[in-house]
């Protein structure tokens, strides 16, 4: 496997972990327990949106950080 692919995979895993953590924290602390199925779906949509954004942002941030440090080594 190419070195760039390993870095992208590592960054994606870090981003997914951050997304999971954000989704957990939002569902546990911020959104109230829903009384209906529609409320549950809405709360999951909110946490999915925030955790997806956070996961993508952190994954991209880590990828750029790792690729920049590897470029300076060469």
Image: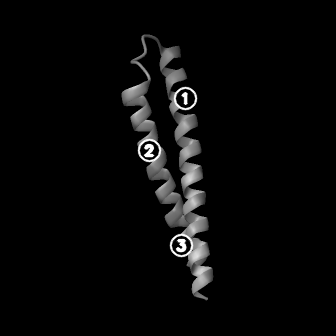
Q: Which residue is mark 3?
A: 6
Does 29 sit above or below residue 39? below
Q: Give x and y (percent) for residue 57.
A: 59, 51
The quarter of the picture where residue 2 lies is bottom right
State the residue at coordinates (54%, 63%). Answer: 62
Tell me if I can see residue 2 in this picture.
no
Residue 43: x %, y % from top left:
50, 24
Residue that label 2 marks: 20
Q: What whole-number distance in Å separates the C-alpha atoms at marks 2 and 3?
A: 21 Å
| SS under mark 3 | helix
Q: Which residue is mark 1?
A: 46
Quadrant location of the C terminus in the rendered image: bottom right
Neighbours of disc 1 within 10 Å: few (<14), some (14-19), many (20+) = some
Q: Where does residue 61 sit, x and y in percent of width and height?
A: 58, 59
The N terminus sits in image quarter: bottom right
Element on which disc 1 rests? helix
Q: Is residue 59 above or below residue 19?
A: below
Q: Is residue 51 visible?
A: yes
């Amino acid at each position: 496997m190419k070195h760039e692919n390993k870095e992208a995979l590592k960054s994606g895993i870090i981003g997914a972990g951050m997304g999971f953590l954000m989704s957990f924290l939002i569902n546990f602390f911020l959104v109230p327990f829903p009384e209906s199925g529609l409320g549950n779906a809405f709360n999951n949509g909110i946490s999915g949106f925030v955790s997806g954004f956070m996961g993508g942002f952190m994954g991209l941030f880590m990828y750029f950080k790792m690729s920049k440090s590897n470029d300076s080594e060469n």
